[in-house]
């Protein structure tokens, strides 16, 4: 059984580290935005991954994100500050973003390679830990406890919105308000965990904007559901989409939603396959409320799948958005053209 549990840890870790592989080739260089002018205006004066032209500035950007991670953890309710899954989820998002930005910057020769080994070492400081089945059980038990609920944090704000039936994620999905019953459904377990993960990601990447069009549709959801992120104090204003060229377009937003969704589906499927093949968790039920048993294999699958699928989705979202806004998209491109430029190097 110890061997089987170790296998869970290794496979879950693999799911977290490699949710999806998207590798822009050198062909994308023919369609890159240039600094200045309309490009800067389209990005809202935010620095581009391509602007990190020296090892020192690139390292500083990674350190800033790692410092932000520590601040996010410090802002959480006491029960979950030292949680292994929480730290691994945050590290996953940092690592995916840093690795993608690093490879693109080097591929396009837009950054010197003076301290490339140092950059890779710095990125490795955010490597996610191996995760065991018991780690997911422990996090879930902490999240259903009311202890620390009065703490003023994004987590509490988002969960309050969820219990009112008012929480909407960045992809425009509004979670269904939970029902009052003696049993807790898998759907409600997933919703609570999703809300928690969205709060972590939005705290870590608090300057990542939400986009909208002239008809007040929010993106990448492409609907009128305002993401709860925009209602949190200090959130940046929604940024208008552009028709084509540099910045975020509807087509790029569609690609962002598609590739992030693929990453989520892959991670959830792999997790379910591994846990489902074991036929249960050793030791029997750990916590039983009504008919809910965290020791039950199906419930554990829901917990693990939701956490890893959500982390993979947001990690891919953050890694790809910088690439997409830096593509000078022709007006006649289709979604296939855009994805080809990312995955196959269309010229």
Image: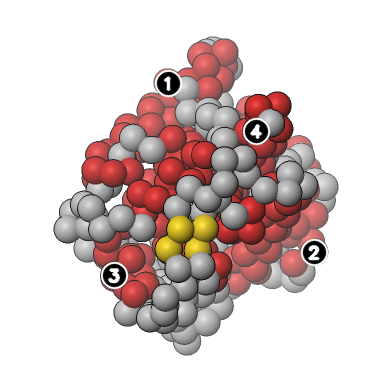
Q: Nearer the viewer, mark 3 or mark 2?
A: 3
SS assignment at label 2 = helix
Q: Position of residue 66 (x, y in %)?
A: 38, 32
Q: Which mark is residue 288?
A: none
Asked where in the image residue 29 lies, by quadrant, the reply is top right
Q: Determine the residue located farthest toward the bottom in the rendered image.
A: 215
- The crowding category of the residue bearing disc 2, from other C-alpha atoms within 10 Å (few below 14, some 14 to 19, many at least 20), is few
Q: Which mark is residue 5?
A: 4
Q: Position of residue 305 (x, y in %)?
A: 61, 54
Q: Is the Cβ of the residue at disc 3 closer than 8 Å to that at disc 2?
A: no
Question: Is residue 256 toward the left or the right of residue 273 in the image?
Answer: left
Question: Is residue 86 toward the left or the right of residue 267 in the image?
Answer: left
C-alpha distance separating marks 2 and 1: 36 Å
Q: Is the Cβ of the residue at disc 1 closer than 8 Å to that at disc 3?
A: no
Can residue 307 be seen from the camera position used here?
Answer: no
Asked where in the image residue 56 lies, by quadrant, the reply is top left
| Residue identified by numbered label 3 | 160
C-alpha distance separating marks 2 and 4: 41 Å
Q: Residue at x 67, y 48 (%)?
A: 280
| Residue identified by numbered label 2 | 336
Q: Residue at x 36, y 54 (%)?
A: 143
Q: Earlier in the sequence, mark 3 or mark 2?
A: 3
| Residue identified by numbered label 1 | 56
Q: Position of residue 189 (x, y in %)?
A: 49, 64
Q: Earlier in the sequence, mark 2 or mark 1?
A: 1
Q: Residue at x 33, y 65 (%)?
A: 158
Q: Earlier in the sequence, mark 4 or mark 3?
A: 4
Q: Is the Cβ of the residue at disc 4 closer than 8 Å to that at disc 3?
A: no
C-alpha distance separating marks 3 and 2: 40 Å
């Amino acid at each position: 059984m110890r061997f089987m549990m170790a296998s869970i840890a290794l496979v879950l870790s693999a799911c977290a580290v490699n949710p999806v592989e998207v590798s822009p080739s050198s062909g994308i260089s023919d369609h890159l935005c240039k600094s200045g002018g309309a490009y800067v205006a389209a990005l809202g004066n935010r620095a581009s991954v391509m602007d990190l032209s020296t090892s020192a500035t690139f390292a500083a950007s990674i350190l800033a994100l790692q410092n932000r991670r520590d601040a996010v953890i410090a802002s959480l309710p006491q029960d979950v500050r030292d949680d292994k899954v929480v730290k691994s989820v945050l590290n996953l998002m940092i690592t995916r973003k840093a690795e993608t930005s690093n490879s693109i910057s080097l591929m396009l020769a837009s950054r010197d390679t003076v301290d490339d080994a140092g950059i890779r070492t710095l990125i490795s400081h955010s490597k996610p830990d191996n995760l065991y089945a018991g780690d997911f059980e422990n996090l879930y038990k902490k999240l259903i406890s009311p202890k620390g609920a009065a703490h003023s944090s994004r987590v509490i704000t988002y969960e309050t919105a969820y219990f009112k039936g008012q929480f909407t994620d960045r992809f425009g999905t509004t979670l269904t308000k939970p029902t009052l019953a003696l049993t807790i459904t898998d759907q409600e377990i997933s919703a609570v965990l999703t809300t928690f993960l969205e709060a972590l990601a939005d705290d870590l990447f608090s300057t990542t904007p939400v986009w909208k069009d002239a008809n007040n549709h929010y993106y990448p959801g492409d609907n009128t559901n305002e993401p709860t992120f925009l209602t949190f104090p200090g959130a940046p204003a929604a940024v208008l989409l552009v028709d084509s060229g540099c910045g975020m377009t509807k087509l790029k937003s569609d690609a962002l939603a598609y590739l992030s969704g693929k990453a989520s589906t892959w991670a959830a499927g792999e997790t379910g396959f591994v846990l489902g093949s074991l036929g249960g968790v050793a030791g029997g039920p750990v916590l039983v409320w009504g008919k809910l048993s965290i020791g039950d294999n199906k419930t554990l699958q829901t917990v693990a799948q939701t956490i890893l699928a959500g982390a993979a989705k947001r990690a891919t979202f953050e890694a790809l958005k910088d690439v997409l806004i830096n593509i000078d998209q022709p007006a006649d491109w289709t979604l296939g053209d855009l994805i080809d430029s990312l995955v196959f190097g269309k010229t």
